[in-house]
Amino acid sequence: MSVFFFLTGLLLVFVLGYIASNNRRDIKLKPIIAMLVVEGILTFFMLSTKIGITIVSGFSQAFHKLVVLGISGVDFVFGGLENNGASTFFLDVLLPIVFISVLIGILSHYHILPFIIRMIGLGLSKINGMGKLENYVAVSSAILGQSEVFLTTKKQLGLVSKRRLYTLCTSAMSAVSIAIVGAYMTMVEPKYVVVAIIINIFSALIIANLINPYDLGDEDDLAIEQSAEKLNLFQTISESIMDGFKVAIIVAAMLLGYIALINFINFLFSFIFHISFQTILGYIFAPIAFLMGVPFNEAVRAGSVMATKLVTNEFVAMLDFQNVSKQLSAKTVGIVSVFLVSFANFSSIGIITGAIKALNEKKGDEVAKFGLKLLYGSTLASILSGTIVGLFL
């Protein structure tokens, strides 16, 4: 049965991708199939083999330890604000982002992360035949985040074509930032966070190949350079601390606004139509969830969470998911968890557009024009990732 729903989910993704394709005649099936096979093998390895499960568990435990260490700093500064035994989302989930941001800054300062990103990107380019820049952004987005990644490609942005820009942005919106992975792991099963980070790289490139196929042709596969000013170690640490704190504050502000807004909309719908807005969204997304492999009797609840992520953000959806996940099967939990781990939502259109516009106004305007199509493609990537995970649950 899992194979059947894998095929239905795959068919859904490819049909919707084909309908929206810019150039259907030039869709190259070979790299798409190659990436799909590699993605399936990696998912099987991580979820169904002892070695893979051990590795994923190791990563999960490592991030849990980092969050605990991050909380030790939070407790020193804010410890008196919490009641004994209580857990405050901002203090225990968001503020540890600051510590993880520092570690990322240090690893980047000593060129460890850039080296890893380049090597993985080079390996990917051998599989999919895409440009080095596309693969670099696909991998680095999963580590640096959807807006930060473009800071490392500032010189290239003004030179890439519109078609290549779409692929770069699809990868960025389909990724997450390692800095907030620890926060995700407090809300959904850590193993699914690890799996999603890896397979979303492939899903985004598969969808980009489907919706936005092209040949590099005479375009130069632009060299990737770190354009940022070189800082010393302590400057890097200080800047990383501030960057991490900004992320925590921004996420907190988004949650304040979106949760209040969704509750207000639910109130209005319940008062006028005697049904919540999220329930309506659940019915709309239920067929998609079902085709991905979610059992029929759980499709509405799963669809509601998936739709919440799309119209708000992944944090709001994960908090909502915590309230219903215990009532769902393990298969549904896995599929929905992986679907949630990405930046694919409406607010990300503005984030990516703003980030690129700040670096290159003309390219920012181009991104704004295909913003909805960008969200469409990255959402299909999330559906594809969830579908593949469902095959092994």
Image (cartoon, rainbow, N blue to C red):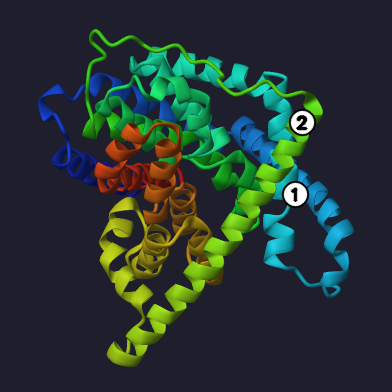
Number of labels in the image equals 2
**Amino acid bearing label 2:** Gln
Q: Which of these two is toward me, 243 or 8?
A: 243
Instruction: Please rate how many residues cluster around mark 2, counting C-alpha atoms within 10 Å: few if below 14, some from 14 to 19, many from 20.
Output: few
Image x and y of residue 165, in percent = 32, 29
- The Cα atoms of the two marked residues, 2 and 1, are separated by 23 Å
Image x and y of residue 236, in percent = 73, 31
Which callout, 2 or 1, points to the residue nearer the camera? 2
Which residue is labeled 2 in the image? Answer: 235
Instruction: Identify which residue is drawn at 29% across, 20% down.
Output: 31
**Amino acid bearing label 1:** Val
Image x and y of residue 100, in percent = 71, 41
Which residue is labeled 1 in the image? Answer: 67
Instruction: Identify which residue is drawn at 38% across, 46% down.
Output: 382
Residue 386 placement, left or right of 80: left
Instruction: Identify which residue is drawn at 36% across, 46% down.
Output: 387
Q: Earlier in the sequence, mark 2 or mark 1?
A: 1
Residue 265 placement, left or right of 95: left
